[in-house]
Amino acid sequence: MRLDKRVTALGLTRTQAKKMIAQGAVSVNGCVEKDPGAAVKDTDDVRVQGAKATVRGHVHYMVHKPKGVLTATRDGREKTVVDLIDSPPRDLGPIGRLDKDVTGLVLLTTDGQLAHRLISPRFEVGKLYRAHVEGALDESAVQAFAAGIPLKDFTARPAKLTLEGESCALVEVCEGKYHQVKRMFQAIGHPVVELERLRISDVWLDKNLAPGEYRELTEEETALLYEAAGMKQEN
């Protein structure tokens, strides 16, 4: 790990960390180190003005996103999913996006590589939604989704559509392009009225979480995400 990244464990930005290092305020195993790119091990004693910069493992949360909340880190004008977390780590961010008017499961992590892989089409991570639409759905909608729906700028990959009622269905996609699920239903003549995300990979939205509430992922849920991303989980 780079020294400047380790120093951010004290709540400093990377820029602030580099400044402190350049000023000679950082020591490694008792010796001043002024190279922000110096490699340090987890076992090294890194201190900033005497305060120990302890290695912090990654943290992961699930949030039940309500309507009107942005899936972003910070906005300055509107509330974001990160704003829902008490004392969030500086590097916490959402895995993928949900539209402002869409509700349901949002995952947050401090592991940028994990987030990148889980939204990459290469890893084909499934996402399950429940959609309430205008009009009555029938078997032709199921077949259209299974075939892959042509949209203006791309053809959506085949998706599994399961009818739950006349105007309600579950749909699983492994892509996450802009307004994709809404556009797929629009293309077959059934505009979306309500959309909720229920699952990412094999991690389901906790039914005990009310809109706006969150919790940390369990060890099992975390392991499922790293497995889906083809990564070895850090201890």
Image: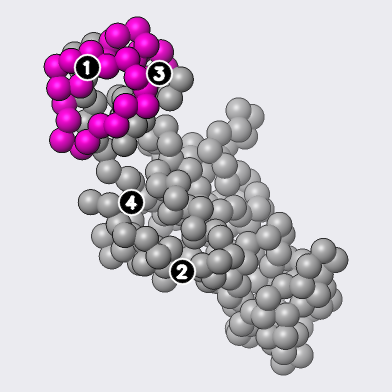
In this view, the residue in front, 120 or 172, is: 120
Q: Residue at x 60, y 44 (%)?
A: 70
The Cα–Cα distance between marks 3 and 4, rounded to whole angstroms, is 31 Å
| Residue named by callout 2 | 201
Q: Mark 1 near mark 3, Cβ–Cβ under 8 Å?
A: no
Stretch in magenta? 16-45
Residue type highlighted by circle 1: Ser
Q: How is the image coloured?
A: one colour
Q: Could you say which quadrant of the image residue 38 lies in?
A: top left
The Cα–Cα distance between marks 4 and 1, rounded to whole angstroms, is 33 Å
Residue 75: x percent and y percent? Answer: 60, 33
Label 1 neighbour load within 10 Å: few <14, some 14-19, many 20+ = many
Q: Could you say which quadrant of the image residue 218 lies in?
A: bottom left
Q: Residue at x 34, y 31 (%)?
A: 2
User: Earlier along the polypeptide chain: callout 1 or callout 3?
Assistant: 3
| Residue named by callout 4 | 216
Q: Residue at x 68, y 76 (%)?
A: 157
Residue type highlighted by circle 4: Glu
| Residue named by callout 1 | 27
Residue type highlighted by circle 2: Ser
| Residue named by callout 3 | 18
**Callout 3 secondary element:** helix
Q: Residue at x 61, y 54 (%)?
A: 98
